[in-house]
């Protein structure tokens, strides 16, 4: 199999480079054979940037009242307070996840908790700190208060 030959040659080449450079802190099995070339990294970043740019356009023609999770949930909260029977009969608690799903996905498209070093970047936001999460949390708290 050519891929096994390539991997073996690649490992041998890397080991020789490490030996020549005096890199003594290498532990066998701790490196990756799936390292990306600079060209692949550039192509990936370009593709990622295109996806992010397209994702910003998804809701650009939607009125602000219908693409802001907090505003949407406020309308449902008002409905529940003014017409509790109608709200209950409509099974809103089952509908909200499907309704909010596209909006949440759009906000999560750039979130990557596994990216190395991201935690130390200033723009890293914990999931629980994201605006959509807070809005749902507040809606749930208000829902629980009004039920008791």
Image (spheres, rainbow, N blue to C red):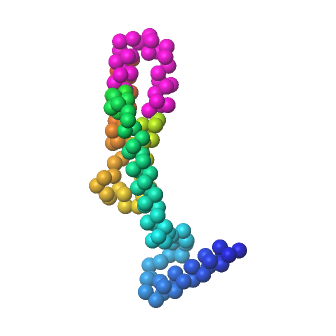
**Residue 14 vs residue 117: left or right?**
right
Q: Is residue 70 above or below residue 14?
A: above
Give the extent of the magenta segment.
Answer: 73-100
Name the chief secondary structure element in magenta.
helix
Residue 49, picture quadrant: bottom left
In the rendering, at what x and y percent does residue 47 appear?
A: 46, 57
- The quarter in which the N terminus is drawn is bottom right
- Name the foreground residue: 73 vs 47: 47
Q: Is residue 145 above or below residue 67?
A: above
User: Residue at 52% across / 86% down in the picture?
Assistant: 16
Tell how many labels: 0
**Residue 81 colored magenta?**
yes
Extreme residue toward the front, this view: 61
In the rendering, at what x and y percent does residue 124 appear?
A: 33, 52
User: Residue at 46% across / 61% down in the picture?
Assistant: 44
Q: Does residue 148 appear in the picture of this structure?
A: no
In the rendering, at what x and y percent does residue 67 appear?
A: 37, 33
User: Residue at 44% across / 10% down in the picture?
Assistant: 85
Extreme residue toward the right, this view: 1
Residue 13, picture quadrant: bottom right
In the rendering, at what x and y percent does residue 38 appear?
A: 45, 71
User: Residue at 46% across / 89% down in the picture?
Assistant: 20
Extreme residue toward the bottom, this view: 20
Residue 104, picture quadrant: top left
Q: Does residue 27 appear in the picture of this structure?
A: yes
**Residue 93 colored magenta?**
yes
- The quarter in which the C terminus is drawn is top left
């Amino acid at each position: 199999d050519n891929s096994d030959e390539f991997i073996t040659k690649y490992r041998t080449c890397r080991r020789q480079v490490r030996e020549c450079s005096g890199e003594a802190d290498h532990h066998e099995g701790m490196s990756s054979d799936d390292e990306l070339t600079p060209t692949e990294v550039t192509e990936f970043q370009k593709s990622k940037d295109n996806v992010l740019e397209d994702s910003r356009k998804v809701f650009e023609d939607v009125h602000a009242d219908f693409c802001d999770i907090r505003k949407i949930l406020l309308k449902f909260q008002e409905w529940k307070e003014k017409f509790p029977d109608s709200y209950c009969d409509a099974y809103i608690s089952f509908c909200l996840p499907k309704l909010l799903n596209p909006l949440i996905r759009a906000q999560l498209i750039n979130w990557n908790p596994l990216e190395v070093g991201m935690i130390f970047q200033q723009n890293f936001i914990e999931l629980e700190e994201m605006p959509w999460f807070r809005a749902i949390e507040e809606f749930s708290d208000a829902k629980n208060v009004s039920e008791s």
